[in-house]
Structures are given as C-alpha cells and as structure tokens.
Image: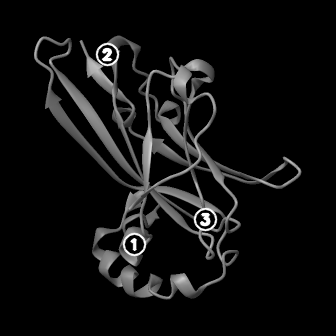
Amino acid sequence: MDEAKGSHDQQDQYNVEVHAKVLELTPEDLAAGIRLFGAPLPKLSLQMIDVVKDFPSLGWDFFPATIAVTRIMLATQPAPGGNPPQTVSASVTVVGFGFRPGVHVRLKWNNAWGFPGTSVPLPDGVPNSGGRFSLLLQHTAVPRAAKDWVWEERNQLVLVAQQFRSNGSIEFDVNYRPVPPHVLWQWVP
C-alpha cells in the first residue's frame, strides 16, 4: 500500500487529520459494496465476485462516476486520565470508478456539523488507467457531546467525490450517503 498524495490545503484548520493509503481495487471490494435500495446483498456477494471479475478490462467510462464506502472499522485504545478515557480510530475503505484516469478526485465528508463549512477535506483519490481507485482513510475520531449529534438520515455524513476539468469546471460530482457519524465523531456524555 502506498500513501495517497494530494490533500486539500485547508486540512490543518480542521481538528482532524486524515491519512490515506492506496489500496488495490479487487472484485471482492466491488462485490462488498453492491446494494439494492440501500440494503447489502450478502447472499449474492460470492456470485457478484464472478460477475465483476471482468471489471478491470472495461474502459474507464463504461460505468458512470461512482463513489462508495465498502468497509468501516472502528477501534478503541485506552487513554488513561483522558476525558473520555479512550480514543477511537476509524478506518474507512472508499472505492471509486468511472472517473477520468490520472486526474485527481477531490474527496470530502459533507454534513460534518461543527466543522468550518460543515465539511472535512479528505486526501484525493487518483484513478488508475481504468478510472478506478481505492483508499483506506484513517484518522482519530473527534470527541463530540451526545446532545450535539444530528440523527436524521439525510443529515448523516455524506462522502462527496468531485473531479474537475482542466478549465476548473466540475466534470463529475457524485456522493454516497448516509455514512454513520461514528466514522468522524466519538460519542461523549
């Protein structure tokens, strides 16, 4: 895995530092993200792996620009004397396909209430020659009082991916929602 290059200039002003590792995009990753009306299809996943095995041979523009979260893992570590007494680390696997090869895809969390502009810039994805990329985003969750959490579905985190043309206009603008708020925030009383 290589460290992803390209993060937004304003990253330091947000009280969260996100690192990214470039991952190989496998048929299993794609099958893990396949859903029907928002619900995962676990029984079809093995069959879907066979269906997507030819995916790497398809041209970058075969599918529309798509971004998805395929895995979320949270881990706690003790923080003696801290408030709260532990820290939470998040690892989120993001896949994108249908993007112009070699042109950075700007990523961010939207609906990040409490952050400037209600968004958190993430390291860019850089599509390979097939228009695909996969990143493992890693950071420490930000403590947030329970009373400040927003629970309505349309107000949960949204992963936004934008790819720009050389003239600065947006060529692709897609999103993935809803992402559980625990990816960014740690619940504190």
Q: Is residue 95 left or right of residue 75?
A: right
The residue that mark 1 highlights is 31
Please give the residue where the numbered disc 3 appears in the rendered image. Answer: 127
Q: Amino acid at mark 3?
A: Pro
Rounded to the nearest angstrom, the CA distance separating label 2 from label 3 is: 38 Å
Identify whether 30 is placed above or below 113: below
Query: Marks 1 and 2, Cα distance to the nearest angstrom?
Result: 34 Å
Name the kind of residue labelled 1 in the image: Ala
What element does badge 1 sit on? helix
Instruction: Mark 1: give few (<14), some (14-19) or many (20+) Cα within 10 Å.
Output: many
Expressed as whole percent of the image width and height from the top left, the position of residue 142 reads: 36, 23
Q: Quadrant of residue 22?
A: bottom left
> Amino acid type of disc 2?
Ala
Q: Position of residue 32 (x, y in %)?
A: 36, 67
Q: Which color scheme did the rendering employ for the protein?
A: one colour
Rendered position, 176 above or below 153: below
Earlier residue among tags 3 and 1: 1
Quadrant holding the C terminus: top left
Does residue 117 appear left or right of residue 82 in this picture? right
Residue in front for this viewpoint, 16 or 156: 16
Quadrant location of the N terminus in the rendered image: bottom left
Q: Name the N-terminal-most of marks 1 and 2.
A: 1
Determine the residue located farthest toward the right in the rendered image.
167
Q: Are marks 3 and 1 in contact (CB under 8 Å)?
A: no
> On residue 146, which mark appears?
2
Q: Quadrant of residue 111?
A: top right
| Count of marks, rendered view | 3
